[in-house]
């Protein structure tokens, strides 16, 4: 054939075109199995077959069965045999006999009309088959579009809390009280929607919370305000859109309100920093708030996942309503420098005991960062699984979500008052009783607080001990904070030679100087090491927690650094004998170490979590008991005049003065059909200066909860 077409150095069509024309008809006459395989490949590429009984536009029944009707004048059957004869249509033997004919005669034969007709027909056939292939590659009309699938769920829950005893904090002039009785009453309606269509997914998780308790009416007009007696709030946990396999397989994008929790610890997660903590409800410890985020995930060969998250808007941690009780603890000075704290303790005690002007915290004002590119938070993570071990490393750049003080401004209130005075607007007309405590006024302080910048390196490791069945989790966060200082602005006070304005920090007789440090820029670590084990219906859990969510700064059992849990002075105003410690000397000389007394604990403390779940009654009933023990203890420091030095005494975690713990018993029963009943208690023990005995924790609470889920 090549000799025929190239005779005399030319031919009617190129060799390649003729070969393709001879080969392509075989495509059009594929067997039924080949056609079916081709259809499966098209389906895998997103092409859908026509519904049964329907034909695509321009399609015949033969083409549906994998056979294509041939143009008139072409006979596909036996075509290979025809090609083997020659283009002239003569048998091969006859063609061989003509090999010896003169070149001119063979050239003339090649120009006969039947050769041109055959080649022209083959060209037409080639064009038709190419058009047919293009048609098959196009999506067919009537192909079903991806279906929308929607999943709905939610619950209706009633929650009642009772405080069995009154909780108080502060002195008579700044007393804070939590009354016994009903402490919380809420009805929560949750709605969850999960919608999918193709590679797209939308998730919506919303709580509508109706609060049963309401504040006292401020005026008669309040009685016409319906919302004043039916207060409610809305909590948006999730509201985002996700696209899978964006641009490339394994590349996912999620935009909207969402929760990103990377930690493996059980409720204690030092690497979960993207979402602000939500401890508004102490019974839901470990919760976090949803926030607007942009998240990109990329999975490489189903073995390594990379995550990048951008958080444009910072949200602060939500605190319990009882946290305002902490404002009465004005003796918990935040300064890192011990000598500076002793000086302030002595000056405050002298002002109260000698001048009759105690210090109170009037307001604490948190200042959130402004919206800017510089204040955006972001994090990256790489996670993988190796030999059944889940490993992840992460980096977070953002802010600590619990506020730290950066400015104190004090003013002098010279209104005298006594312990027996009635509350405003009532006026007292009788004279104070003998022995009744009175003051000449107050030093009212307003504190501004900010959220310090931090960088956090995170590491997570989780798995199970082979052959034993004990699961383990280790989560480590190494924090790199910015340095925090506190500026103090004071009023004019008797016995203080410095003018009103900024405090004289360095005692050089002039206002200002280097502001005292609240937190150093030194790195510190938090971690959680946990184990769990199941024995039939019993689940056991134990964790070592190094650092709670609200603890910040360097200082633990490895490195020095403490916070004040209580502070006072134990010296008289005037010396009882020559050279003895006294407030007048400590409060005016700038050296208060001989008078101040403090109770300290590490900035980052250690805790032991022990828990057990026991299921019975065919798994319908659950009894849960969890305990949280403060292991760090407390340090009491004071001046010992007999040795002319400060001394300290450690109060261990199991001593009467150092004990602090939480006990959480709960009983749950599932009646079936989504109906559950929970009853339990949150019991907090310890002195007022301890972690869990602190009045700001709200004291003991008993709860009753009913829930219907659908």
Image: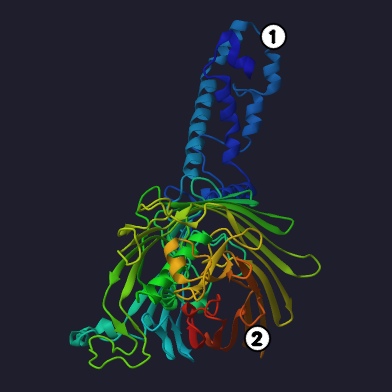
- Tell me where residue 625 appears, x and y as whole percent: 63, 83
Q: Are marks 2 and 1 in contact (CB under 8 Å)?
A: no
Q: Residue at x 63, y 29 (%)?
A: 82
In this picture, is 646 found above or below 5?
A: below
Q: How many marks?
A: 2
- Mark 2 residue element: loop
Residue 485 in picture, x, y percent from top left: 44, 55
Answer yes or no: is residue 143 visible. no
Direction right: furthest residue: 467
**Residue most extreme to the front:** 578
For the residue pair 255 and 417, the one nearer the viewer reads as 417
Residue ID at (47%, 90%): 162
Q: Is residue 466 visible?
A: yes
Identify which residue, 95 or 12, lies in the foreground.
12
In the picture, measured across the screen, residue 538 lies left or right of residue 20, that is: right
Residue matched to label 1: 100
**Compared to 448, does 598 lie above or below?**
below
The mark nearer the N terminus, 2 or 1, is 1
Q: Nearer the viewer, mark 2 or mark 1?
A: 2
User: Could you say whether the residue bearing mark 1 is in a helix, strand or loop?
Assistant: loop
Image spot of residue 541 (x, y percent): 68, 75
Q: Provide residue 103's location: percent of width, then percent of height.
A: 62, 6
Colour scheme of the rendered structure: rainbow
Q: Which residue is mark 2?
A: 619
Query: Is 662 placed above or below 297 here?
Result: below
**Which corner quadrant of the image does residue 181 belong to?**
bottom left
Q: CA distance from mark 2 to mark 1?
A: 98 Å
Q: Quadrant of residue 556?
A: bottom right
């Amino acid at each position: 054939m090549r000799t025929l077409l190239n005779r005399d150095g030319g031919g009617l069509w190129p060799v390649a075109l003729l070969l393709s024309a001879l080969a392509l008809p075989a495509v059009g006459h594929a067997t039924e199995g080949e056609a079916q395989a081709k259809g499966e490949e098209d389906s895998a590429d997103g092409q859908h077959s026509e519904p049964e009984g329907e034909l695509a536009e321009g399609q015949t029944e033969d083409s549906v069965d994998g056979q294509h009707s041939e143009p008139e004048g072409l006979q596909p059957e036996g075509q290979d045999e025809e090609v083997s004869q020659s283009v002239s249509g003569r048998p091969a033997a006859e063609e061989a006999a003509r090999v010896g004919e003169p070149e001119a005669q063979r050239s003339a034969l090649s120009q006969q009309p039947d050769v041109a007709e055959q080649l022209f027909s083959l060209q037409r056939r080639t064009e038709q088959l190419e058009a047919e292939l293009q048609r098959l590659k196009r999506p067919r009309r009537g192909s079903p579009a991806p279906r929308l699938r929607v999943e709905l769920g939610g619950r209706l829950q009633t929650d009642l809390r009772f405080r069995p005893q009154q909780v108080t904090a502060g002195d008579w002039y700044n007393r804070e009280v939590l009354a016994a009785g009903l402490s919380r009453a809420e009805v929560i309606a949750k709605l969850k929607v999960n919608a999918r269509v193709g590679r797209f997914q939308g998730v919506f998780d919303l709580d509508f919370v109706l609060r049963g308790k309401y504040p006292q009416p401020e005026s008669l007009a309040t009685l016409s305000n319906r919302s004043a007696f039916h207060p409610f709030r809305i909590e948006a946990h999730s509201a985002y859109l996700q696209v899978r396999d964006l641009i490339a397989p394994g590349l996912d994008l999620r935009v909207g309100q969402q929760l990103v929790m990377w930690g493996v610890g059980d409720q204690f997660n030092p690497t979960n920093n993207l979402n602000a903590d939500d401890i508004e409800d102490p019974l839901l410890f470990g919760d976090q708030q949803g926030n607007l985020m942009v998240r990109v995930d990329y999975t490489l060969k189903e073995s390594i996942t990379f995550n990048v998250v951008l958080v444009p808007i910072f949200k602060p941690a939500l605190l319990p309503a009882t946290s305002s009780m902490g404002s009465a603890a004005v003796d918990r000075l935040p300064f890192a420098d011990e000598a500076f704290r002793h000086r302030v303790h002595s000056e405050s005690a002298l002002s109260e005991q000698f001048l009759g002007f105690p210090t109170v915290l009037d307001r604490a004002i948190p200042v959130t960062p402004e919206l800017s590119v510089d204040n955006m938070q972001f994090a990256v993570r790489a996670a993988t699984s190796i030999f059944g071990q889940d490993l992840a490393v992460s980096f977070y750049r953002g802010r600590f979500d619990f506020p730290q003080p950066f400015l104190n401004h004090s003013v002098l209130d010279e209104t005298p008052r006594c312990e027996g005075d009635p509350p405003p607007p009532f006026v007292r007309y009788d004279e104070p009783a003998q022995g009744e405590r009175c003051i000449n006024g107050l030093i009212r302080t307003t504190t501004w607080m900010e959220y310090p910048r931090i960088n956090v390196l995170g590491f997570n490791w989780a798995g199970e001990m082979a052959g034993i069945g004990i699961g383990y989790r280790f989560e480590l966060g190494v924090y790199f904070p910015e340095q925090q200082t506190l500026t103090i602005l004071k009023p004019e006070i008797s016995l203080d030679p410095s003018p009103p304005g900024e405090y004289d920090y360095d005692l050089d007789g002039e206002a200002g100087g280097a502001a005292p440090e609240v937190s150093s820029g030194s790195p510190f670590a938090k971690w959680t090491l946990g184990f769990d084990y199941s024995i039939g219906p019993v689940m056991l859990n134990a964790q070592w927690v190094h650092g709670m969510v609200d603890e910040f700064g360097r200082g633990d059992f490895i490195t020095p650094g403490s916070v004040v849990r209580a502070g006072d002075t134990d010296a008289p105003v005037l010396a009882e004998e020559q050279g003895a410690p006294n407030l007048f000397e400590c409060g005016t000389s700038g050296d208060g170490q001989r008078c101040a007394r403090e109770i300290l604990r590490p900035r980052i403390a250690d805790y032991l979590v022990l828990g057990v779940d026991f299921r019975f009654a065919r798994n319908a009933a659950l009894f849960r008991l969890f305990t949280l023990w403060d292991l760090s203890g407390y340090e009491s420091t004071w001046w010992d005049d007999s040795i002319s030095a400060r001394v300290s005494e450690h109060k261990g975690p199991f001593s009467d003065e150092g004990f602090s713990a939480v006990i959480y018993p709960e009983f749950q029963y599932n009646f079936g059909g989504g109906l559950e009943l929970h009853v339990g208690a949150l019991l907090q023990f310890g002195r007022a200066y301890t972690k869990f005995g602190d009045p700001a924790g709200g004291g003991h609470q008993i709860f009753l909860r009913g829930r219907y889920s659908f």
